[in-house]
Image (spheres, grey):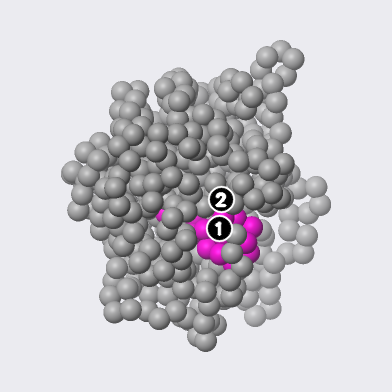
């Protein structure tokens, strides 16, 4: 059975992970440049200086997307390539690059879905406090307005921020990601609030500056709670309640990020749990944060099974899916095919908006075999299993509108450098040779069949 008519089949990537050209044509440094240059922060001290050299090879990469049959490409813009200091005078050469890239995509009949911020915050603004500074919302709004004025005649699909839990939880609380801070919980809640305010300013700027009707969202993420018995109402309700609970202190509470955007308020259980640490909420802040969005964008990878205890509360099953459950080469990527079904179902029931999987993918240690090909059957199996569950959601009336595989290319996987490979296309980082993997051709066939082959 095929997917719904007009379902969007896409691929995704992010600026710092593929562009390279870190010091070329006027680009300013970002926090990920700073972080990766510090010894020990990234596997084997890799950095994004060259990455996939997409800045110079984008035409080749667009051709690969065209041959794949991708209907859409989710890309991100490098804020500091466009505004080297984050604010102030624009960099004409940086803007010109994105002009060329957008035009090449449209010429190939690939719809650009643009993310304004995928973690590469300008260094100059981080030195002024980053998201701890209330002015961050206005900085971001100015950047969004500039981008809208330049690209908004051609780009109609937008996301403001990618994965707030990673930006603040991993970057401001745990210190594992750029900018590498380890702040108290109260400081993280302040940064989170300013990030959400920045999202709101971004939405306003895009609506004001783009021509015609636009579709805007924010790319959320979490870890799915999967009912141990998918036919047991008690397990389902326990999973739902735990999925949207907001009392964890690790900044990965989905409702802490999504409720303010959709409902204009923080969840009550989180406010109660964090009462002594809540930031000052200014007059109009929640109205700003809750600017209308058009769809739910969600990056979905994994989750864990839960069952209802005697009181109906979610109990995480010891051992999860059991010893030896398939996983990717990153420890958090447990293969959990039901995760997208429950993500889409639970969120659309709560937030009443269409749903797009803005990321989903599997990482391995793929390499070019002696026959010159890259054989990655595990990725094909992963995609098949996950897409079957997405189609199940569609068949049940869940409004899933699209799927973006992460990623079109192997790329810089943040603190893991170039070790773990997510791509449909293998990249030799020494020669920059691109080799489509077996999964590339499988996904090409899937797109042609509108998913009927899964």
Tell me the SS state at disc 1: loop
- From the viewer's side, name the closer residue of 69 and 290: 290
> Looking at this rendering, what residue extends furthest in the right direction?
323
Residue 347 against residue 381 in the figure, above or below: below
Q: Which residue is mark 1?
A: 179
Question: Residue 34 — which label?
Answer: 2
226 with respect to 316 (left or right)? left
Side of 356 relative to 153 (left or right):
right
Whether residue 225 is visible to the viewer of this picture, yes or no, is no
**Closer to the camera, 120 or 113?**
120
Considering only vertical position in the picture, is 294 above or below 136?
above
Task: State left or right for residue 363 relative to residue 211.
Answer: right
The residue lying at 44 percent from left, 79 percent from top is 279
Choose between 145 and 403: the one closer to the eye: 145
Magenta stretch? 161-178
Q: Specify the quadrant of the image occupied by residue 124.
A: bottom left
Circles 2 and 1: CB atoms closer than 8 Å: yes
Q: Secondary structure at mark 2?
A: helix
The image shows a total of numbered marks equal to 2
């Amino acid at each position: 059975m095929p997917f719904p008519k007009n379902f969007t089949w896409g691929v995704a990537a992010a600026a710092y992970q593929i562009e390279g050209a870190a010091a070329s044509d006027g680009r300013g440094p970002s926090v990920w440049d700073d972080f990766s240059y510090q010894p020990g922060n990234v596997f084997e001290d890799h950095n994004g200086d060259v990455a996939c050299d997409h800045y110079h090879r984008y035409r080749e990469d667009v051709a690969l997307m065209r041959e794949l049959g991708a209907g859409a490409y989710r890309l991100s813009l490098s804020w500091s390539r466009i505004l080297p200091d984050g604010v102030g005078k624009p960099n004409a050469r940086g803007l010109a690059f994105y002009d060329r890239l957008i035009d090449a995509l449209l010429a190939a009949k690939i719809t650009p879905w643009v993310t304004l911020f995928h973690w590469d915050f300008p260094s100059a603004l981080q030195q002024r406090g980053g998201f701890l500074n209330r002015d961050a919302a206005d900085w971001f709004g100015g950047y969004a307005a500039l981008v809208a004025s330049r690209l908004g005649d051609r780009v109609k699909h937008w996301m403001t921020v990618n994965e707030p839990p990673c930006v603040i939880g991993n970057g401001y609380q745990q210190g594992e990601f750029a900018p590498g801070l380890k702040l108290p919980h109260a400081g993280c809640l302040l940064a989170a609030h300013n990030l959400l305010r920045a999202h709101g300013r971004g939405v306003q700027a895009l609506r004001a500056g783009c021509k015609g009707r636009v579709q805007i969202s924010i790319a959320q993420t979490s870890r799915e709670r999967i009912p141990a018995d998918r036919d047991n109402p008690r397990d389902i309700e326990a999973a739902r309640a735990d999925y949207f609970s907001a009392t964890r202190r690790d900044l990965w509470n989905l409702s802490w990020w999504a409720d303010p955007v959709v409902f204009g308020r923080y969840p009550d259980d989180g406010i109660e749990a964090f009462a002594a640490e809540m930031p000052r909420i200014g007059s109009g802040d929640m109205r700003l944060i809750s600017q209308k969005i058009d769809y739910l964008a969600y990056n979905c990878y994994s989750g864990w099974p839960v069952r209802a205890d005697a009181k109906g509360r979610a109990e995480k099953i010891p051992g999860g899916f059991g010893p030896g459950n398939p996983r990717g080469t990153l420890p958090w990527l447990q293969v959990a095919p039901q995760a997208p079904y429950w993500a889409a179902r639970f969120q659309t029931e709560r937030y009443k908006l269409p749903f797009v999987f803005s990321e989903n993918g599997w990482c391995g240690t793929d390499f070019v075999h002696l026959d010159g090909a890259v054989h990655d059957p595990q990725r094909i199996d992963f995609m098949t299993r996950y897409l079957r569950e997405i189609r199940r959601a569609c068949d049940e009336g869940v409004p899933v509108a699209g799927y973006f595989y992460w990623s079109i290319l192997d790329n810089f996987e943040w603190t893991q450098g170039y070790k773990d490979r997510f791509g449909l296309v293998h990249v030799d980082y020494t020669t920059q040779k691109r080799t489509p993997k077996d999964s590339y051709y499988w996904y090409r066939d899937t797109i042609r069949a509108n998913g009927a082959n899964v």
